[in-house]
Image: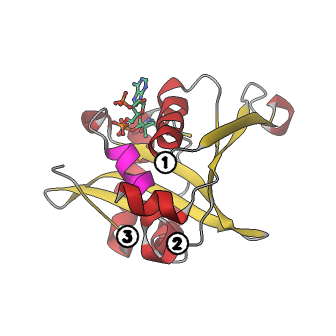
Amino acid sequence: MQYTIKMPRIEDGKAMWAIARDTNVLDTNSPYAYLLACTHFKATSAVALKDGEVVGFTMAYTLPDSPERLFVWQIGVHPAHHGNGIGLSMLIHLVTRENCSHITHLDATISPENTPSNNLFKKLATVLDTIISNEPYFNQHHFPSGNQIEHYISVGPIKNKTKEEII
Ligand SMILES: CC(C)(COP(=O)(O)OP(=O)(O)OC[C@H]1O[C@@H](n2cnc3c(N)ncnc32)[C@H](O)[C@@H]1OP(=O)(O)O)[C@@H](O)C(=O)NCCC(=O)NCCS
């Protein structure tokens, strides 16, 4: 693949923010939130680079009460680079990263209407030879806009043996 995937650096925060904005799908968090992903959560986050430019990012953290679960807060790929395998590669990169060897599940919340994202996580489950669960989590009463719904999805169990096989 023509893309390099690595841990984010503090200099990548601005580009991550801009990609989130340019997807027209993701909530654009504050620039500060992306800087935290590049610092506090860099060990569990990733950026995809092409010719040194950030074209995709995944910000994720381990759940404080369940550190074996890696929760993907946001994943975004610049629209010009969709469909090139970047999203899937970033997720595989994270679950196979040396410091993530203890991770057994990769979790996220997704709108049921977000077909690309739902298919991305289903594809990850297939590649990892495991299952994906999906259940309602945040409903319209939890959001100020009153029309957003998010389901909790979980991909796993991800066995270390599986990780070794896909590297
Ligand atoms: C979701 C997103 C990150 C996918 O990134 P991507 O690099 O384009 O995805 P990949 O090329 O790695 O695709 C992996 C799989 O995802 C699914 N997929 C990706 N884009 C899809 C689309 N437009 N329609 C349907 N399925 C899609 C497919 O199953 C694909 O596997 P395949 O190519 O073998 O069919 C990207 O579409 C994006 O940034 N969307 C806007 C932000 C967003 O919705 N983020 C997720 C919020 S939870």
Question: Going from the N terminus, do you reach mark 1 or mark 3 first?
Answer: 3
Q: Amino acid at mark 3?
A: Met
Residue 27 shows up from this direction: yes
Count all numbered tags in the image, as a single digit: 3
What separation in Å lies between label 2 and label 3 (alpha carbons)? 16 Å
12 sits to left or right of 40: left
Q: Is mark 1 within 8 Å of ligand 1?
A: no
Asked if residue 104 is positioned above or below residue 87 in the image, the reply reads below
What separation in Å lies between label 2 and label 1 (alpha carbons)? 14 Å
How many residues crowd mark 1 within 10 Å: few (<14), some (14–19), many (20+)?
many
Q: Amino acid at mark 1?
A: Leu
- Give the mark toward the camera: 1 or 3: 1
Question: Going from the N terminus, do you reach mark 2 or mark 1 first?
Answer: 2
Q: Which residue is mark 3?
A: 7
Magenta segment's dominant SS is helix
What separation in Å lies between label 1 and label 3 (alpha carbons)? 21 Å
Asked if residue 88 is positioned above or below residue 34 in the image, the reply reads above
Q: Which residue is mark 1?
A: 128
Mark number displayed over residue 27: none
Q: Position of residue 98 (x, y in %)?
A: 44, 75
Asked if residue 164 is positioned above or below residue 125 in the image, the reply reads below
Q: Residue furthest right?
A: 141
Q: Amino acid at mark 2?
A: Ser
- Give the mark toward the camera: 2 or 3: 2
The residue lying toward the viewer, choosing from 49 and 2, is: 2
Q: Which residue is mark 2?
A: 101
